[in-house]
Amino acid sequence: MNVPMLDLKAQYGPLREKIRSAMDEVCDAQYFILGPTVTAFEAETAAYCGSAEAVGVSSGSDALIISLMALGIGPGDAVITTPFTFFATVGAIERCGATPVFADIDPVTFNINPSAIAELLAHWPDRFAGLTPRAIIPVHLYGQCADMDAIMGLAKQHDLAVIEDGAQAIGSEYPSVDGPRRAGSMGTTGCFSFFPSKNLGGFGDGGLVTTQNAELAERLRQMRNHGMNPRYYHKMVGGNFRLDALQAAVLSVKLRHLDDWHAGRRSNAAYYTSAFADTPVETPAMVYADSSVDQPHIFNQFIIRVPKRDAVKAHLVAEGIGCDIYYPLSLHQQECFAGLGYSAGDFPEAERAAGEVLALPIYPELTDDMQAHVVQSVLAAI
Ligand SMILES: *Cc1c(COP(=O)(O)O)cnc(C)c1O
């Protein structure tokens, strides 16, 4: 039995007519750039994320870049983030001319460890003289929020902005001191991606920035359109970071199904978790599951840790099972970041994770038979 890592055709089938008619409306209107379809989608996603404002942009990567640009972060500034994330998080910091400063992860959640951030800030001038810390980018990796209360506390204490990288976590909830809050509603901005493999995926690239700050939202809206306001008058240099109306039309249809898909992923996660209990396979911890939150994890990825990970992966691939490694090399060890001066051993938990993690298929349309086959194959491999 073949089990793909992701089966987008299975998701598209039942929605085909609705999506095609939404796309047809855009074609009939011939209004392709921003406009009413994008504005409507922004209002829906702002409400969904529990944020006052949402600004549709061209990708998750651009959501990060435009957030940094709108906050005026650039050369001489430092941005604290995790070394264990998709490249774009750190690429955005470099693209703005700022300097990424890494803090190691919590081995249970794989998210940035607030005590590592506190440690950095406590000894800042010794190590980073000449750099001003301006922001923290926590990543809600795999679909579970980073420890935002602790991060927001540190940010407040040190006057830092917080840019949530929620690309893998739209709708994921965190039990904050103020009650349950969704990813992207807590920081200065929240960044989302509609890359097709995310839980809310478009028919191409797309992204979103959320914020509770109306003034910042206005700045983001101008910046995504070359800093233009009014037309052909430019008070600032932005870029072309616009979301297409066709993507917004598709995403609006899909948004109505998102919570059902999240629930399907959580139910598949529960299946794996009980099937791997009392085996050497380490399954992910849902650290917020005991509190009042409805969506403690959205499982964009289901990540196990296994001994001899590469051999297990090879076995699964040979059995026709899709699986992948997110991510095989911590970012402080990437060739392009050699100039930052880090070396092996600097972030032991990120490095250990890079050697042990394996993502199994978790998409909502997976059947019990398929999951049973995945479990059998993993157990046979070890
Ligand atoms: C996917 C992703 C991004 C980038 O999103 P794109 O839309 O592909 O540019 C950024 N950060 C994280 C953590 C991601 O998973």
Image (tube, rainbow, N blue to C red):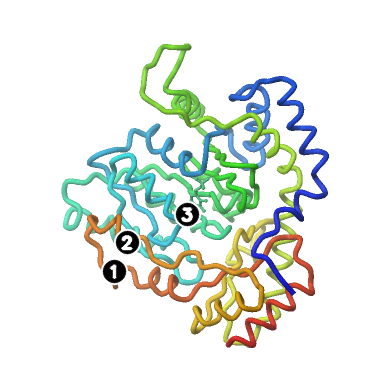
Give the mark toward the camera: 3 or 2: 2
Disc 1/disc 2 C-alpha distance (Å): 8 Å
Q: Is mark 3 within 8 Å of ligand 1?
A: yes
* Pointer 3 residue: 139
* Three-letter amino acid code of the residue under disc 2: His
Residue 161: x, y in percent?
39, 42
Per the rendering, the mark at residue 346 is 1
- Cβ atoms at labels 1 and 2 below 8 Å apart: yes
Disc 1/disc 3 C-alpha distance (Å): 19 Å
Mark 3 residue element: loop
Disc 3/disc 2 C-alpha distance (Å): 16 Å
Residue sitting at 31 percent across and 43 percent down? 134
Q: Is mark 1 within 8 Å of ligand 1?
A: no
* Quadrant (top left, top right, bottom left, bottom right) of the N terminus: bottom right
* Three-letter amino acid code of the residue under disc 3: Val
The answer to whether 230 appears left or right of 237 in the picture is right
Compared with residue 195, is residue 266 higher up or lower down, i.e. above or below?
Answer: below
Residue 154: x, y in percent?
37, 52
* Three-letter amino acid code of the residue under disc 1: Asp
* Pointer 2 residue: 332
The answer to whether 9 appears left or right of 321 in the picture is right
**Front one among 16 and 302:** 16
Query: Mark 1: few, some, or many residues within 10 Å (few <14, many ≥20)?
Result: some
**Number of marks in the rendered image:** 3
